[in-house]
Amino acid sequence: MKKLFAVCIIGLTLGTAAFADHPDGWGVGLVGQGAFSGAFGFGPAFSLKAPVLPIYWGISLELRNHYFGLGLTGDFYFLEGLFVPISGSDGFGYFIGVGGYLGFGNYSDEWWNGSKNVKWSWTSLGLGVRVPLGLNVVIPISKIKLEVFIDAAPSIGVGFTFYDDSDYWDQNDHNLVGLQWGVGFELGVRVWF
């Protein structure tokens, strides 16, 4: 009985994935990315899916006062399906995947504290794995298709932070290595052509 149940589940999963898919071709779009990992942040990103690779890329750039950040995600959707079809494989659906992330950040500031010039800077690097779970709607419009999607991506990885040895840090390097965890989320639009 257990074997029959397992075969039915696998067949249902493969059947759903075979008949529901993201569109073929190039997928290009804009995404709002955010994350919760003890702190909350949100920023824009660029989304890209090339027809020859099964990877959905996300590229983000963050520029603000004294800070530069660059992020990259790459996800492979191993399960896709439709809840409500519109035409063919288009409609309201879901996707589940596995992927990775890489993030780089640098902060640097300098100020006068009343008696001397103080410098404060750090550089961080993080990498790990993530599991995107999402919903999407694919709408055919003439020769292109429009996709609106939302997903959450729990992640775990390792982070490295390198501090300088300025007066702010009492002439000591404070380099840290630690476990990173979080839940990222994305809300975006892709055009498929």
Image: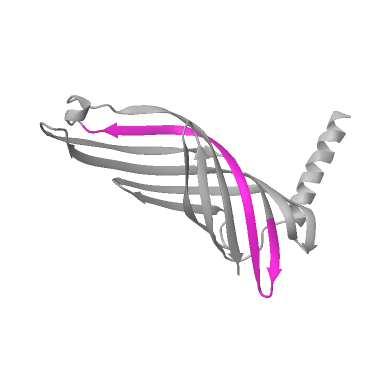
Q: Specify whether 144 is left or right of 44.
A: right
Q: Specify whether 150 is left or right of 17.
A: left
Closest to the observer, 79 or 45 = 45
Residue 120 place in picture, x, y as percent: 23, 35
Residue 160: image quadrant is top left
- Residue that sits furthest to the left in the current view: 115
- What are the residue bounds of the magenta stretch? 137-164
Residue sitting at x 74%, y 59%: 91
Closest to the observer, 169 or 181 = 169
The secondary structure that dominates the magenta segment is strand
Closest to the observer, 40 or 76 = 40
Residue 2 place in picture, x, y as percent: 85, 29
The answer to whether one can see residue 132 in this image is no
The answer to whether one can see residue 188 in this image is yes
Q: Is residue 171 above or below residue 185?
A: above
- Residue that sits furthest to the front in the current view: 114
Q: Specify whether 125 is left or right of 111.
A: right
Tally the marks. 0
Magenta stretch encompasses residue 122: no
- Residue that sits furthest to the bottom in the current view: 142
Residue sitting at x 19%, y 36%: 119
- Residue that sits furthest to the right in the current view: 1
Q: Quadrant of the N terminus?
A: top right
Closest to the observer, 86 or 38 = 38
Magenta stretch encompasses residue 159: yes
Q: Quadrant of the C terminus?
A: bottom right
Residue sitting at x 59%, y 59%: 189
Residue 90: image quadrant is bottom right
Residue sitting at x 79%, y 55%: 84
